[in-house]
Each structure stands twice: as structure tokens, then as C-alpha cells.
Amino acid sequence: TVLVVDFGAQYAQLIARRVREAHVHSEIVPSTMPVEEMLAKKPKAIILSGGPSSVYAEGAPNVGAELFETGVPTFGICYGFQAMTRALGGTVDRTDLSEFGRTELNVVAEDSMLFAGLPTEQLVWMSHGDSVIEAPKGFRAVATTTGAPVAAFEDTDRRLFGVQFHPEVLHSEHGQEVLRRFLYEGAGCRPTWTMVNIVDEQVGRVREQIGDKRAICGLSGGVDSAVAGALVQRAVGDQLTCVFVDHGLLRKGEAEQVEKDFVAITGAKLKVVDAEERFLTALSGVTDPEEKRKIIGREFIRVFEQAAREVVAESGENGSEVEFLVQGTLYPDVVESGGGTGTANIKSHHNVGGLPDDLRFTLVEPLRELFKDEVRKVGEELGLPPEMVWRQPFPGPGLGIRIIGEVTRERLDVLREADAIAREELSRAGLDREIWQCPVVLLADVRSVGVQGDGRTYGHPVVLRPVSSEDAMTADWSRVPYDVLAKISNRITNEVREINRVTLDVTSKPPGTIEWE
Ligand code: XMP
């Protein structure tokens, strides 16, 4: 295994993901773990992640020199690079040039191990205030940028390496290759870790966690919960009951599809709960996005508790309690709900920050460390059909967070129609894979004047929010062809009486998020 030492912020998971992409097994450990404990895991390599702080900041995680005397090949990234410099006697200092974002890197040693065969000028992603001025003894500086005199160094004898930039983000042109060079050349790792291994490992872990107990899995109609359900089904079979909650905030045709496809393929036990009344009552009068999310998260759990009691009752004789709740939580959900160390709460994802305090289930979250596209691959590996695995992501709180204003049944019906039209036309234009997702948002409290068939209308606008993305952590607005947009706009305003205006959201993430609430 390769240990990714987490110094906080959001970087460690992304690094772990890139290591998986290089087909090498990885495990994240906190920076507070004692070195002996790390060594007990017999790592083939150690990667030190970036972090939020300067090495000189108060409370900055400390790194002792012993971490570099283990003989295990080690790669420091950003904060990890600076921490390594300091621990080994090099100089880190504040220069006047902070670098944030795309920066040009110059490779100054063409025979360097990290950069061999790569262009000597390349764009990298930087985010630092302090810089390494002088490499520690024994190291050779191999790259530089305007703001970082030493932007990469290596000591091939001791097999210690470091870079100031972030090789794990896609904006660093050759970042993945640099990381691979460290893993394969620097540390002698071999690319043997595959999707089959990942599924097997997760199935094994789930089996161990659940044992011979019972579990229920909340299906939301989205990809993540379907994959989580299928995975747990493979691990514990009939000890699992899937619960599909129709909360009235679903898209058109959603409930039918889950019943038909999911059950047919996985053979899972399914329970469908009609909870529309309950959710709409709880949401009545509520307009604040965080409040909506918390209410929906709470109601989900209440419905699951009820369903769990029914499962026990139905199983008759020695019906034991349902102890576990399976959720399709992904890594980005955890980060955005403020779950990482030192990360801010952007919004409370219903299945993370939206959970009630008195939760009685133990959570099973087999996808918690994965990103969406990895989850899709796991789904394919488990035999789920492409229509299900490649569906647009759909948030658990559903259309409830796509109505800006109070959520009512009438408004939901209006939005459902508009959403179905947009999805149909985007599919017809063959854009399903190109577009990550396209929320349709109803501005329910906004009205505007229009004219239709010689008459005045006073209707509501909807916003089309087509985005492209790799993992939903960042996104750009999709350049959907004008004639496709025209078709969608035409059909929505003609077929949905309450809507007299269709607008397009042209904001990237950041600064906008994908969903409006
Ligand atoms: P944002 O709006 O944060 O969305 O840019 C990122 C991705 O997450 C989805 N999303 C959710 N998924 N529960 C979910 O299961 C939630 O509470 C939730 N909120 C947002 C969103 O659709 C996008 O794909």
C-alpha cells in the first residue's frame, strides 16, 4: 500500500484517487499518526499531502525528521514539500510572490527522475504563500517557477522527492505523470490494483461490518445509492432490504424506473414507501435552503426507522433489529458538508450534514472515499446497466432544492414537466455523457410579463443549469448548441402553461454551486 498522509483540507482524497488511477493501492492516514504505526502498515511509499496552512503558522501540523529516516520512498506535495524541507534543514521563507492557480514551471534538470521525458516548460497548479528558498543537503533542485526558487527537488539515493505544485489536480498538465514516475520509478510500485480489487475489498469490508445483522438501504433514484445498494446486496444478500422513498420531490418516471430496473438486476428486496404527504407537510412554509435540506434529511431517517420496524415485523419469528443504514455517500458530499479537516460547510448534503442528531442506525457508506466516476465504474463492475450507471446525478433532496421559494405540490408538478422536457431533448441531442447534469430550477417567487396568443401572461421563469464536470467539486457551464436550447425553450413555454420564460445559467463552480440551493 501507499500511505497518503493527510495534513488537512481537501487534497488527500484527490491524491489517493490519483494513486488508484495509477493502479496502486492507497490508504489515507492522519498526520498525527506515529511513525511506527505507519511503518507497521508496511508501506511501499509515503505521500505527504498539501494542507491549509503555512509551515510557520501557529498550530501547523508538525513533521519530525524521523519520518524521512524510515527508508520508505517519500514524496512531499505543497505543504508536505515545505514540511520536508524544514525537517531536513532546508530553508522555507516568505517571498513577495505568492502563487495561486496556473503557473509556468521550468524543469532545470532534464535527467531528473520525476520529470524525465516530460516537457521542460509546463503548466502546473500552485497555491502557496511561502516558498522553498534552499533545498536541504543531499537534494538537487530540479524545477523552478517565478515565485518558487525551488519548485521541485529530489534525492534519489535516499529516495526522497518533493514538489511545490499540486500534481493531483487536472490543471497541472503532467501532474499525473509526475506522480506515476514517483510511484513506479521512485518507489518501485507496480500497477496491479484494479476495479475488481476495489469491489472485492469493499464487499469484504461491508461483510465484516454488518456480520449477520440486518441492514436497510435508502434508494434515492440516483446513481450513488443504487451502486451502494447493489454492492451491499452482493456482500450480505437478503440481510439487506432496499427502501425507496417516494417523497414527492422526484423526477417524472423515477419511481417506476427504480422498481423496474434495480430490482430486476440486483434481485434485492425492495420496499416502496409513499411519503409525499409527510415530506410536503414538513416543508410547508419553508424557504431557507439549509432548513429545507435539514428537514428532508430528518424525514428520510424517520421513514427509514418506520420501514425498519416493518421489516422486523414482517420477518416474523425471531425478527432481529435492523442495525445498519446503507447510504450512497460520496467523498465530495463529505467535503462540501464540512466533513474534511479544516473545510467549510458549503451546503449540508442530506445524507451527511442533514442527518438528525438522534440517529439510531449505524451507517454503512461503502462509497465514502470514492468520486462519482469511480462509483460509475464500480456500478458497471457490479453489472448495473449503462442507463442506470450513466444517469445524471440527482440529489437526494430532489426537486425540493430546485424550487426557489416554498415547495408545494403545484410547483413540483410544474417543475417536473419542465425538467422532463429538458432531459428528453438533451438525450435526443446525444448530450447525455457530455453533460454532467442539467438541473432545471423554478424561480417560484419571481414573475414576469409575457405575451402568448395575443394575451398577456404573468408567469414564472425557469433556469437551465447544464454543467460539465469531472467530479462535481468544480464545474463549468456547458456550451449546449443553440438549436438544442431553442428547442427546449420552445417546448417548455408551449407545453407548461405556468412558465413563460426560460433562462440559461452561465456561471462556473466556483463561484456558483451546481444546484441553486
Ligand atoms: P453542488 O450544488 O454542491 O452539487 O455544486 C454537487 C453535486 O452534488 C449533488 N448534490 C447532492 N447530492 N444529496 C445528494 O445526494 C444532497 O443533499 C446534494 N446536494 C447536491 C448535486 O446534484 C451535484 O451533482
Image (spheres, rainbow, N blue to C red):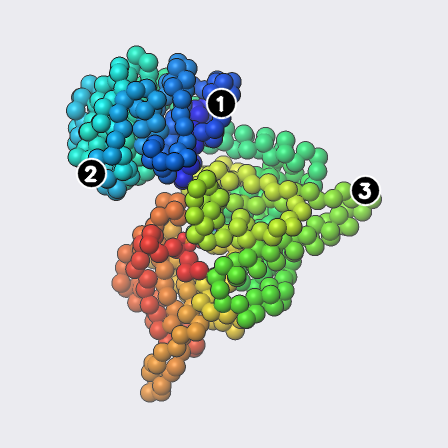
114 and 140: which is toward the camera: 140
Viewer-proximal residue, 179 or 23?
Answer: 179
- Whichever of labels 2 and 3 marks the residue nearer the N terminus, that label is 2
Query: Which circle, 3 or 1, is nearer the viewer?
Result: 1
Q: At label 1, which amino acid type do we have?
A: Pro
Left or right, residue 352 beside residue 437:
right
- Amino acid of disc 2: Asp
The residue at the point 61 percent across, 68 percent down is 281
As measured in the structure, the alpha-carbon distance from the residue carrying label 3 to the one carrying label 1 is: 46 Å
What kind of element bears circle 1?
loop
Q: Nearer the viewer's eye, disc 1 or disc 2?
A: 2
| Residue 314 sits above or below residue 237 on the image | below
Q: Residues within 10 Å of mark 2 (few under 14, many from 20)?
A: few
- Whether the residues at callouts 1 and 2 have beta carbons within 8 Å, the answer is no
Quarter of the figure that contains the C terminus: bottom left
Task: Determine the secondary structure under disc 2.
Answer: strand
Residue at position x 27%, y 28% in the image:
92
Q: Nearer the viewer, mark 2 or mark 3?
A: 2
Which one is nearer the viewer's eye here, 418 or 396? 396
Q: Residue at x 63, y 34 (%)?
A: 209
Q: Position of residue 59 (x, y in %)?
A: 41, 35
Determine if the C-beta at disc 1 is less than 8 A from ligand 1: no
| Residue position for label 1 | 34
**Left or right, residue 170 beside residue 385:** left
Residue 96, disc: 2
Q: Give the Cα distance between marks 1 and 2.
A: 35 Å
Circle 3 residue: 318
Real-space CA distance between mark 2 and mark 3, rounded to the nearest whole angstrom: 71 Å
Task: Pick whichever of labels 3 and 1 is earlier in the sequence.
Answer: 1
Q: Position of residue 375 (x, y in %)?
A: 47, 41
Evaluate if marks 2 and 3 touch, with contact meaning CB atoms under 8 Å apart. no
